[in-house]
Image (tube, rainbow, N blue to C red):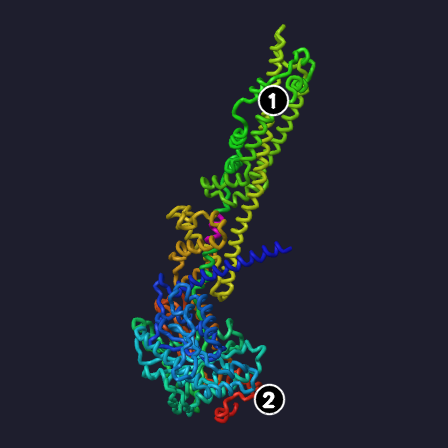
């Protein structure tokens, strides 16, 4: 029972391993297409330096997500710095980041990119002031800093005063504050090293990201003001935005406390964003332990606050959860801090008026309420692009399917040709048998064997068998056995080593490389028309010949001497005996030699039959593996297509099947049908198959990337590609042909439907709702021109178009603001839990802050 189970587990393990390699291959192609090195596409650049500050352990997964997106899309991302402040062990966070970064798309093509270096060591430097060991882990871009707050480590959510205790513990810990100072100064110095990457170094954009239910966000004012103060020593202006990530879908086991803690933070956030908010604290610490106060005058703490949930405005969950908001965060940062290319500013009516440019001051003013109360913002994001990963996997599948079909193709050979391939044709078998028999005429040599003195008259009434015994006794048989039979048997043993048939097939394969394991398996299966069927028929014929020969020999040995055509001499008895001996050799021992030949030929054929069974099993193992690889490739392609948007992923298999077929035909017309099997490409696939599916797949991916994926038909703009793919199943004179205008309308509507704002407001048409929408796409794109002017007379929102040197897709960012926190469904739902936890003795705010908060609305 264990053997089949182990085999199944092994096969499953191999299939999963192959799919992992396929995923890496698809990601690599997608990254190449995103960077568009061969297609003339470029990436955007940010104008001013940028710092992403992640606060809290719960937001840790967003670090790698934001980093990878920026690295993919920003040309000068190498100068962006990321800081994660948490309470988990910094070295553990680094290990997690290493694993994440090593498998991320951005590291496949850029091994020297600023990722978390695996050989970095944990910084155990001790502060001069005696505050103790600092807990940070750094590389060129990412810093993981651990606040040594024993309260949070020991109590977690078991304490009724967790958020309060975190706040108190931080202010009572000189080591925590000093470590934070030291880390931020190193970060500031590192940012200064990247000055050459930016157009201006006057301002820095700080993006703070936290989860609403993370207890560490109770320290947001302290962390934010300390970072701004230190950065202000290097920059003329520090602009800080906050992105609050709200998780509504995950609240299953801890929905009560998470909702209460999340609402507690939102109340504090409302206070921080009030116009009269002030802050003062001794946050700056020198190396000598001297504390310097930091103040914040009456003003909102953050320039803008964005609230992003894992549910959208319609109340449905967002695929990928709250971590998907990383794309929105990156796009907002790019929109506010994008390096403007003057050559794009004259595109269309919208560009000429400057109306497509994002204005942060204008947006802030428009989301401010009539009572001058600060408004909050949210956003939605959608992208439509060429489905690069499904394309890579689909083209790979169709290429392999074609090559597999070539390997499975049956040649127009006769059964005689097939027998000759395995060395089973009559001349080959006869040569092998003749090589077994003695070359000299040993039968005639038997005439010299000493005989008993018998007269012909005595021998005449006897049978040939009796006459032989009367003349030789056992001598003739012993001589024949020793000098003929035994040497043949020894030669048979020497030459009947296992694998002779397979070696012959491999030798013939050198001459006929198109005849491989599929033909071997088919010809050796015993079915009608197969080589094995012919071999079995030959064995039956030889068996019948052998039986006939034995019967004939037996019949002759029973014949009487007097009935033999022996020439008799009168009065010469010895001559008559000599003539009888010649007759015995001719009529008995020469047939015995023929019988021996038949026996050994039959023995040899049966050995070949046994080896052919083994060859069939072996060949079927190889062909089964080759066929399984085809299924794995198709599964991987179909899974990737299914993961894409239903509309954007339509007809990928059909369209790229035709594209691949045309590319193959074109390549073979130029370079010959055997181009695939040249040593520098696939080589001998049969030989690769023996080495393992992983080796075969690796070579296949290299060949596909080199010969197909770089071809011109795979470099169409995303609109043209989508239009052709949408119409691939349309037949001649079909009225359902999708026109370019139809396509643009669908794309426009799809982007709008998918860019739903990622927060649910209680009243969809809230009083102060304000919207701005931005398209990101290629400045040569016809669709971008269409989008810029669509609904021109009816829209009530500001529309912007951000032109990039990018032809692989288009993106849309919807900004919405003007709501208050109490307008959010998460706020209203959290009130029940907040009140209940408060009534049950939970202290969710620091004591000095609780009295300053506005009443729950």
The stretch drawn in magenta includes residue 214? no
Alpha carbon distance from label 2 to label 1: 113 Å
Q: Taking the image as drawn, is residue 762 in sight?
A: no
Q: Quadrant of the N terminus?
A: bottom right
Task: Using the image, tell me which numbered label, if any, was put on residue 219.
Answer: none
The residue at which mark 2 appears reads as 840
Residue 160 percent coordinates (x, y): 56, 86
Magenta residue span: 398-405
Residue 557 percent coordinates (x, y): 66, 21
For the image, the number of numbered tags is 2
Q: Main secondary structure of the magenta part?
A: helix
Provide the secondary structure element on which disc 1 rests: helix
Instruction: From the viewer's side, name the closer residue of 142 and 570.
Output: 570
Residue 770 percent coordinates (x, y): 43, 82
Instruction: From the viewer's side, name the closer residue of 349 and 334.
Output: 334
Instruction: From the viewer's side, name the closer residue of 518 and 342.
Output: 518
């Amino acid at each position: 029972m264990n053997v089949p189970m182990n085999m199944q587990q092994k096969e499953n393990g191999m299939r999963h391993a192959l799919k992992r390699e396929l995923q890496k291959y698809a990601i690599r192609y997608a990254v190449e297409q995103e960077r568009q090195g061969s297609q003339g596409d470029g990436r955007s650049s940010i104008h001013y330096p940028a710092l992403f500050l992640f606060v809290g352990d719960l937001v840790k997964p967003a670090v790698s997500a934001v980093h990878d997106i920026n690295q993919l899309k920003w040309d000068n991302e190498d100068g962006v710095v990321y800081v994660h402040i948490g309470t988990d062990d910094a070295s553990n966070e680094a290990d997690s980041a290493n694993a994440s970064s090593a498998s991320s798309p951005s590291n496949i093509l850029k091994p020297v990119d600023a990722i978390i270096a695996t050989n970095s060591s944990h910084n155990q430097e001790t502060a001069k002031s005696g505050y103790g060991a600092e807990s940070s882990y750094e590389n060129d871009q990412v810093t993981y800093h651990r606040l040594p707050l024993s309260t949070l480590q020991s109590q977690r959510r078991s304490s009724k005063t967790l958020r309060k205790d975190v706040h108190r513990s931080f202010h009572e810990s000189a080591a925590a504050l000093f470590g934070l100072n030291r880390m931020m100064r190193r970060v500031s110095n590192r940012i200064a090293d990247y000055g050459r990457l930016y157009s201006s170094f006057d301002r820095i954009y700080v993006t703070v990201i936290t989860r609403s239910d993370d207890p560490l966000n109770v320290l947001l004012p302290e962390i934010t003001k300390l970072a701004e103060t230190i950065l202000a020593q290097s920059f003329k202006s520090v602009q800080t935005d906050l992105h609050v990530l709200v998780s509504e879908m995950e609240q299953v086991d801890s929905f009560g406390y998470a909702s209460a803690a999340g609402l507690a933070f939102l109340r504090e956030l409302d206070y921080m964003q009030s116009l009269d908010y002030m802050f003062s604290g001794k946050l700056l610490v020198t190396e000598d332990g001297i504390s310097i106060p930091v103040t914040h005058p009456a003003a909102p703490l953050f320039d803008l606050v964005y609230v992003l949930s894992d549910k959208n405005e319609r109340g449905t969950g967002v695929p990928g959860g709250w971590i998907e908001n990383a794309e929105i965060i990156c796009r907002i940062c790019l929109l506010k801090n994008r390096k403007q290319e003057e050559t794009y500013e004259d595109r269309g009516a919208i560009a000429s008026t400057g109306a497509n440019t994002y204005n942060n001051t204008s947006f802030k003013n428009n989301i401010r309420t009539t009572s001058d109360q600060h408004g909050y913002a949210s956003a939605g994001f959608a992208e439509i692009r060429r489905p690069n990963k499904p394309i890579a996997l689909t083209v790979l599948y169709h290429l392999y399917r074609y090559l597999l079909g070539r390997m499975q193709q049956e040649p127009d050979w006769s059964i005689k040709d097939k027998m000759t391939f395995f060395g089973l044709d009559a001349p080959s078998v006869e040569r092998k048998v003749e090589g077994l028999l003695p070359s000299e005429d040993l039968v005639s040599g038997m005439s010299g064997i000493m005989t008993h003195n018998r007269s012909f008259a005595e021998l005449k009434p006897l049978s040939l068998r009796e006459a032989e015994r009367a003349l030789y006794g056992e001598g003739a048989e012993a001589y024949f056995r020793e000098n003929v039979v035994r040497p043949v048997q020894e030669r048979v043993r020497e030459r009947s080593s296992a694998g002779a048939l397979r070696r012959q097939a491999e030798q013939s394969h050198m001459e006929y490389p198109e005849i491989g394991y599929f033909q071997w398996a088919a010809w050796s299966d015993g079915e009608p028309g197969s080589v094995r069927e012919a071999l079995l028929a030959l064995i039956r014929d030889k068996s019948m010949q052998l039986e006939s020969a034995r019967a004939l020999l037996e019949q002759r040995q029973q014949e009487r001497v007097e009935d033999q055509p022996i020439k008799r001499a009168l009065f010469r008895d010895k001559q008559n005996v000599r003539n009888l001996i010649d007759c015995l050799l001719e009529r008995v021992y020469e047939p015995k030699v023929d019988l021996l030949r038949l026996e050994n030929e039959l023995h040899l054929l049966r050995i070949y039959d046994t080896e052919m069974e083994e060859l069939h099993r072996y060949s079927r193992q190889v062909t089964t593996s080759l066929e399984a690889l085809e299924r794995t490739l198709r599964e991987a392609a179909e899974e990737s297509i299914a993961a894409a948007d239903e509309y954007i992923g339509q007809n990928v298999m059909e369209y790229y099947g035709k594209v691949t077929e045309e590319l193959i035909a074109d390549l073979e017309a130029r370079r010959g049908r055997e181009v695939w099997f040249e040593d520098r490409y696939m080589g001998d696939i049969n030989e690769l198959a023996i080495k393992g599916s992983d080796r075969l797949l690796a070579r296949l991916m290299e060949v596909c990337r080199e010969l197909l994926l770089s071809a011109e038909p795979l470099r169409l703009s995303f609109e043209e590609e989508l239009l052709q793919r949408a119409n691939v199943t349309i037949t001649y004179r079909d009225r359902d042909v999708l026109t370019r205008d139809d396509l643009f309308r669908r794309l426009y509507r799809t982007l709008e439907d998918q860019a739903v704002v990622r927060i649910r407001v209680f009243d969809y048409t809230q009083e102060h709702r304000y919207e701005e929408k931005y398209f990101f796409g290629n400045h040569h794109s016809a669709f971008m021109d269409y989008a810029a002017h669509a609904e021109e007379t009816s829209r009530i929102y500001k529309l912007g178009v951000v032109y990039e040197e990018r032809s692989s897709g288009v993106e849309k960012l919807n900004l919405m603001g003007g709501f208050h926190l109490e307008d959010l469904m998460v706020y209203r739902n959290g009130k029940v839990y907040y009140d209940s936890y408060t009534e049950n003795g939970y202290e969710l705010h620091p004591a000095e802050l609780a009295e300053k908060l506005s009443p729950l609305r």
